[in-house]
Image: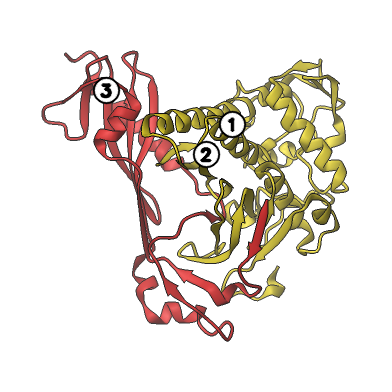
Chain colours: A yellow, B red
Amino acid sequence: MKRARPLLGTFVEIAAEGLPDPALDRAINAAFDAVECVRRLMSFHDPHSDLSRLNRLAAIEPVEVHPWTARVIARALALHHATGGLFDCVVGAELMHWGLLPDHGFASVQPGRSTAVQFMAKNRIAFRTPVALDLGGIAKGFAVDRAIAVLRRQGVRGAVVNAGGDLRVFGPEATPVHIRDPLNPAVVWTAGFLNNGAIATSSAAETIKIVRGTKVSALVCAETRAPLTDCNSYSVVAATCALADGLTKVLAQIKRTDVPCFKRFGATGIITIPVGTSPLAA
Amino acid sequence: MRWTPFVAIPAAFVIVIPAKATVYLTTEQAQRAVFPGASFTGVPGRSGVWRVSTGGYFIIDRVVGKHEYITYAVGISSNGTVKQIEILQYNESFGSEVREASWRAQFVGKSAGSALQLNGDIKNISGATLSSKHITDGVRRVLAMYETSLKGVQ
């Protein structure tokens, strides 16, 4: 059984097998509910999300958030540390400035780093400076992981959850995985076979636009704070989709698949250069 | 986790998909998925609009994007809010140039064992995120139609 819903600003497809139809239906519905819950908590676009409350208030006082929000932020901070700062979720100010994220009337957003975010207690978070956190680099992968966790708990034999290109497979069989050419959507190539794992892909190509005469995108270089504007796509295979999703942002900056920390994470990087362009254009 | 890379040279296994259709649900299956246990009565003069026995409406609409057209269903609760959205069918189509040998030629000869295929059943594609914004626009249009011509009508 395979179903799809528009969620997280993209199409989320859930395929599952190995249970009678009514049970599969219930399992898939519950998995979609988990994805919707992640959206409700961590959407930058929704002014009522946990994330928007943090961005509005955490520089003034500690904010209590849902355990899932706290978990994603804790992972984002750990990834920031493990990647020498290359993974950084504190890019809200830049993306708002470039018109890629909405301004919900935040008082005075300043650029900053993940080090501005601190845990005061298990689910209580404060910002040292008025930064804007954007979980767009990891929350979609986390939502895919939650959906897979729900499906497993409900007893399905095998499942694939694909949130607009960030996907995770679960089950006894290896599944072929394809990667789309970043500039030619009609073209895909077979990257490999995946068993109980995840792959995520990021590309500046999807969000590039010209703002005030400058080319911008939703991928930000952690060091220079400049937008990344090459048209390659950067895929990462890892055990969880949140990790794969997060590490694509690191690969997009380093642009080499032999990133030292990938080995530690058991992750594999894949760079797809659009057909017909020179690798040097990256 | 186990990952088995297929090949070191991507272009050797390029697949061109001129058109791809994925059917998720039939109308009846979508009705059951959105309003379980209810019965449905077509609204006269309006195709794709059903009144639901338990209150509310079930509406089928289609949106067209740059390379895709999507048939989807919206369940509207009796209080006029969106209950659920389900995709019925997702079609991708990449136009005539993809069918032309000259366009496809650019992918050939990238490596020795170049195996250019045309294939309609490719699953599990990772890649740049596809926007669902046109569904959001479509739902807004459906809700406006509900407000002006369905709401309160018996």
For the point 25% across and 20% down, the residue is: B38
Q: Position of residue B154 (x, y in %)?
A: 16, 13
Disc 1/disc 2 C-alpha distance (Å): 10 Å
Horizontally, is A249 left or right of A194 in the view? Answer: right
Which numbered circle lies on residue A45?
A: 1
Q: Position of residue A59 (x, y in %)?
A: 81, 22
What residue would you read off at disc 2?
A9
Label 3 in the same subunit as label 2: no
Horizontally, is A134 left or right of B18 in the view? Answer: right
Label 1 in the same subunit as label 2: yes
Q: Position of residue A65 (x, y in %)?
A: 71, 19
* Mark 2 Cα-neighbour bin, 10 Å: few <14, some 14–19, many ≥20: many
Name the front one of labels 1 and 2: 2
The residue closer to the viewer here, A158 or A226, is A158
Examine the rendered structure and indicate whether residue A64 appears above or below residue B125: above
In the rendered structure, which amino acid carries the disc numbered 1?
His
Can residue A106 be seen here? The reply is: no
* Disc nearer the start of the sequence (1/2): 2
Disc 3/disc 1 C-alpha distance (Å): 28 Å
Q: Chain of mark 3?
A: B
What residue would you read off at disc 3?
B57
For the point 81% across and 17% down, the residue is: A60
Disc 3/disc 2 C-alpha distance (Å): 24 Å
For the point 65% across and 37% down, the residue is: A142
* Mark 3 Cα-neighbour bin, 10 Å: few <14, some 14–19, many ≥20: many
